[in-house]
Structure formats: C-alpha cells, structure tokens
Amino acid sequence: MVKNKLTASVLSAMITAAAPMYMNGLCAVDMDYTGDGRVDTFDLIRARQSASPEELARLSDFLLGKPVSSGGYTLVWSDEFDGISLDNSKWSYELGNWKTDAKGNYITNGWGNNEQEFYTDSNASVNDGVLTIAARKESYSDPKQGSYDYTSARLSSQHKFSTCGGRIEVRARCDSGRSLWPAIWMLPEDSVYGGWAASGEIDIMEGWGSTPGKICGTIHFGDVWPNNTYLTADYNFPDGDSTENWHTYAVEWDSGEMRWFVDDDLYSTQKDWYSVNRAYPAPFDQEFYLLLNLAVGGHFDGIDGIYADPATFADGEKHFDIDYVRVYKKDGSSFAPTPQSSASLSLYREGAEAGLTNKDGCSVVHIGSVGEKPYSVMALLEGNHVSSGDVRTLSFTAQSTAPRDMNVTVEDGTYTRYLDETVSLTEEAAEFSFEVPFGSDMDVDVKFLLGNTGESVPSGEHDVTLSDVSWK
C-alpha cells in the first residue's frame, strides 16, 4: 500500500463522515494515539483516555473532515485522490503543446520551454488513492498543432481553487530517466501586474529525470519576459535516495518570505523579490492556482535543451505519482491579496513607436509615433468574459502630455463593438465612465486606441496616462 487510509470498522458509526487521510500529513502527524500508522476511530477511543479536551475536539474534527489546526496552520483545501477518477470540481486538463494568449490564440509551441509532449486528458488516472500522470512514447496527431512522439498530462486548479499565502504541501514520487521533467508549481489566478513573469510564478518542486538525486524550488518575478529574473535553490537527497521514492514537498508562503521543504527539512528561504514599478511584496501578494505536470524534453532536461531521449521509454511509460495535495492557511494571518486600484494593461502596436509601463494605480503609454491607423497603438484589457444580461461599467481617468483624441471601444472576437466612444485628453486628468450592456455570453477586449485617431493627434512624442481603470 502506498498510504494508510481510514478503513471501515465496527466502530465507524461513531463518526458520521470519516475523512480518509493518513499520517504523513501536517494535520495527522500527532493524532495516531494507537501507534498503528493510521488515524481512525480507534484513535478516538484511545484519545478519550489520555487526550486533553482540546486534542479530543481536534481529532473529532479531523475524522469528520472539518478544518483542523496544527502547527499554526489549518487545512482549507485538499485532494486525497480517493475516488476512481480525477475530481473535475478541483482540476482541469490543460491540453496540447502550444501556449495561448488570453483569447485562446496560439502564441508559441513547446509551452515556451521547447517541451516535446502533447498533453491529453487520457494520460492521468486515479487508483488506490494515487493520481498518476503517465508520460508515453507514442505517436499523436492534432489537426491544428501537428504531430508529436510523446504524450503526457498537465492539471490545473485555475478558476477552481487558488490561494494567497499559506502552506502548500504535496506528497509525490517520479520515475527517473533523461528528459523527464516533473513539476509542482503555481501561477497567478489573475495577472494583475502584467504578463509572465511580472505577475510571478512559484515552483514548489521541479525535478531532473537525468539527476533524480536533486530537485529545486524557484520563484520567477521582476518584469515581463525577457526582462524577468528568478531565485532558486537545489535540494540534494541523501545518498541512496531520490525523487523515485515518496517525499513530501512543501512551500510556506508568508507576506514577505517563502520557505521550501522536503520532508519538513527546510532547504531554501527567499524574500528578495519584486515586480517592476510595484510595491513589495508584489507580485507574491495575489491569488495563485496549482499545476501538476510531467513534461518530456525541453530546456530543463532535454537533449540540447530540446529533444526527448527515447531510451528513457525503452521499458514503457513513465509515471509521476501524487499521493495528495493539501493547502493550509496560517492561523491568525491577515495576509490577503493586495487590492488593485487600476487594472494592468497590455500594449499592441503596428507600424508605430510606443511603449507601455504599468505602475501602481496607472498605466503610462509613451508614444513616439502614432502610425497610420487608429489601432496602430492600443492599450488593452483583454479576455474579459461577460454573460447574457450583464451590464458592465468601464471607468478610468485619463490625461495626455499633448492634447489629443482617444477612441475607447469594447469588442468581441469578430471586432463587433459594444462600446465606441471618442474622448478628448489634455494635461489635466479627466474622469470617464461608460455602461456597456450585453445580450449574450462572450469574451471581450477593452481597447484604448491611441494611434492615428483623426485630426486631433499630436505629431511629436507624448505620454498618455490611464489611471484607476476599472471594468465591473
């Protein structure tokens, strides 16, 4: 057996909803009153003989599946993988080989890392309390993305669970072999500070299949690629041990510090991160979701930073096994996402000279030349989902170092406009607000058009500042 589960007994009626959790977890480690390596109703009987009222109440809550506090943390979310299939209320499959933008457009293959696998919804399974992600050497063709020699799976909790701070803990093991890249990591639920990696990335565990005797924990931050940076540290297992064996990987994430653990052995502490033009502790002061995947090839452990080694699969598929995922909140902590007074914007330019800087409370567009078309320069708030019957309000404050007009639109993927307004900007900041109704479900982009919008356009360099941008 991989783990000791709560099993049925003649005393099970004492507990109405026993929680199938086992001893290696943070909450259960001091609840094994019988010493049999599991936590069940027999421990409740023994606890009544020796435990304090507080300890007895804690054990009862644990068996009932209620949040339990231990070591300064309370369990708030978990997946024990005790069913017969993946819990779709907690995880979604991320499919394919290409990264996409906010509107689903393909932007780069290999997930930006030269990865060689195609992620499917058929390479993950749940059996005997364990999630298994299987990497396989097999031919796979997709009508849009082409042909591939390897498949695997990538799971995400985006839009289903995210957290700001706490302790994130995963018990896992992985087969070894050149070009295997197991990862337990986190990305921002909303990229409020801009594209990767301005809004951050947290890597709880990444392993090299070619060197299973070590793993690393990393954070990525700073600015939008390629101006991003990172901090990382390696953990080296004792001789004879490796990622092939079961280990517990965890990160404890506070407002100004992150700590990485393997089997509760602290090996890395980081606190010197930043997000350009933002107040510390940005970007790690927002909600992040979880990802689990087993990549094949790529820059981390691929041959020449690209190719997979077919010899790794000579004896069959390779497995990344996950026993559980648990998230705890720190008791008494008030750490919560930092409210944003203005949405971060992205820049589009075509035949023009322009740059965009997001800051706390505003976005500044520096325009060198406006180009030939109204959309030659645009500040964008992209990929906003709306539902039928919604009435959204777009509000913002705007000013320009040179007088000019700006078109403001809200458009769907076919460029149908649900808002089309022209506003005049001067050096004095002015507030604007527009209501936008919708008759069907769709994704829309908010666009601030700053190209050649007509006669009232400056010929020289100028800056446009958009402050307190809100779409509610």
Image (cartoon, rainbow, N blue to C red):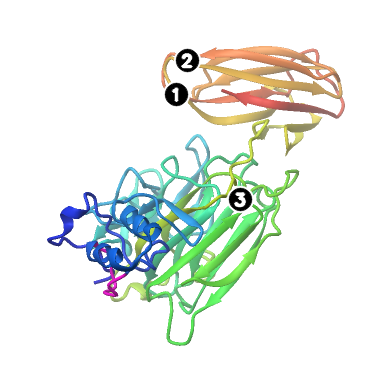
Label pair 1/2, CB-CB below 8 angstroms = yes
Q: Residue lying furthest bottom in this view? A: 239
Other-residue count near label 1 (Cα within 10 Å), few / some / many at <14 / 14–19 / ≥20: some
The residue lying at 79 percent from left, 31 percent from top is 367
Is 363 above or below relative to 456? below
* Residue type at the position of mark 3: Gly
Quadrant showing the N terminus: bottom left
Extent of the magenta region: 33-40
- Secondary structure beneath label 3: loop
Q: In this figure, what is the number of numbered marks?
A: 3
Q: Main secondary structure of the magenta part?
A: loop
Question: In front here: 52 or 183?
Answer: 52
Q: Is residue 185 visible?
A: yes
Q: Position of residue 192 (x, y in %)?
A: 61, 39
Q: Is residue 364 left or right of residue 151?
A: right
Kindly identify the amino acid type of the residue bearing the numbered disc 2: Phe
Q: Quadrant of residue 348?
A: top right
Asked whether residue 232 is in view, the answer is: no
SS for callout 2 = loop
Q: Earlier in the sequence, mark 3 or mark 2?
A: 3
Going from the N terminus, do you reach mark 1 or mark 3 first? 3
Dot 2, crowdedness within 10 Å: few (<14), some or many (≥20)? some
Residue 88 screen position, x and y as percent: 31, 44
Give the position of the C terminus as an image quadrant.
Answer: top right
Please name the residue that numbered disc 1 is placed on.
442
Q: Which residue is mark 2?
A: 438
Would you say residue 119 sits in the magenta stretch?
no
Q: CA distance from mark 3 to mark 2?
A: 33 Å
* Circle 1: residue type: Met
Q: Which residue is mark 3?
A: 200
Front position among marks 3 and 2: 3
